[in-house]
Amino acid sequence: MQVHFIDVGQGDCSLILTEDTAVLIDCGEKSKMPDVYKYLMSMGITHLDYLICTHPHSDHIGGMAKLLDFFTTDCIIMPDIPGNMTVTTFSYTNLLKTAERKNIPIRLVYTTDEIKVKDSYTIDIIAPVNDYEEINNYSIVCRIKNGVHSFLFTGDIEKAAEEDIIRAGKDIRANVIKVPHHGSDTSSTEDFLYEVMPDYSVICCGEGNDYDHPHKEIMALYRGFGIDTYVTAFNGNIVFVSKDNKLSVVSEY
């Protein structure tokens, strides 16, 4: 299994590859779609088994609708967001219209769900587990295991969601964590890190972004836990390879 954290500036984009499967989690802003397109084509990908939209913010799904003009997919995965929090952003509504036009099914996932990716592996849905006032906390959190190695993808969850995930008692241990919310101090509580106990962390953010991500105190927290941390703003594209009992990582810079 290869897990690619694609540099899309201030946004998220992760690609999970096995010999015969490809799953994309988020894809950054629409302006970054050409970069994602080129990256996927360089991997020889024309079809995505699943396209996971962690939540409806444009820095995560801005380019998804356009991406579907070039790549087919079996299904789009989304969180179940309550009707009173209906999202009307162009990125989100355009994605829904594109999926309808292309007859692509949309699957709303819950914490009891496990998504089988052919016979290769299972995506375990961890969150959302509660109702929230902040849409970031509705982010899909999922865990993928390949042999002895596991990867945790966290979208933009904040402290409230982290606390609920811990209380839910699901296994969130992972060798690699995609750091919540671009390394913001709204997330990454010590209790959450104690539960995950990763060897590596990846922060997806843009160089010189307006939010000062990653926040200094979060970088210090991960260093304090002895976690080897990569940042797309500094390291570019980051690729983990899980094979047999070995986990290796290489970055663009």
Image (cartoon, grey):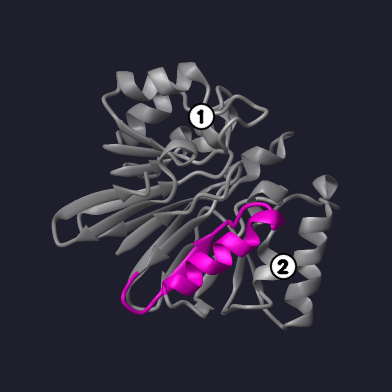
Rounded to the nearest angstrom, the CA distance separating label 2 from label 1 is 33 Å
Residue 194 visible from this viewpoint:
yes
How many residues crowd mark 1 within 10 Å: few (<14), some (14–19), many (20+)?
few
Residue 224 position (above or below residue 158): above
Quadrant where the image shows the N terminus: bottom left
**Residue sticking out furthest to the left:** 245
Nearer to me, 75 or 82? 75
The answer to whether 7 appears left or right of 226 in the picture is right
Q: Position of residue 9 (x, y in %)?
A: 58, 44
Q: Earlier in the sequence, mark 2 or mark 1?
A: 2
Disc 1 on helix, strand or loop? helix
The answer to whether 129 appears left or right of 16 in the picture is right
Q: Position of residue 74 (x, y in %)?
A: 56, 79
Residue type for callout 2: Ala
**Residue under circle 2?**
65
Specify start and end residues of the magenta stretch as a single range: 18-43
How many residues crowd mark 2 within 10 Å: few (<14), some (14–19), many (20+)?
many
Q: Is residue 150 magenta?
A: no
User: Which of the labelled discs sits on residue 163, or is there none?
Assistant: 1
Give the residue drawn at x 66%, y 47%.
59
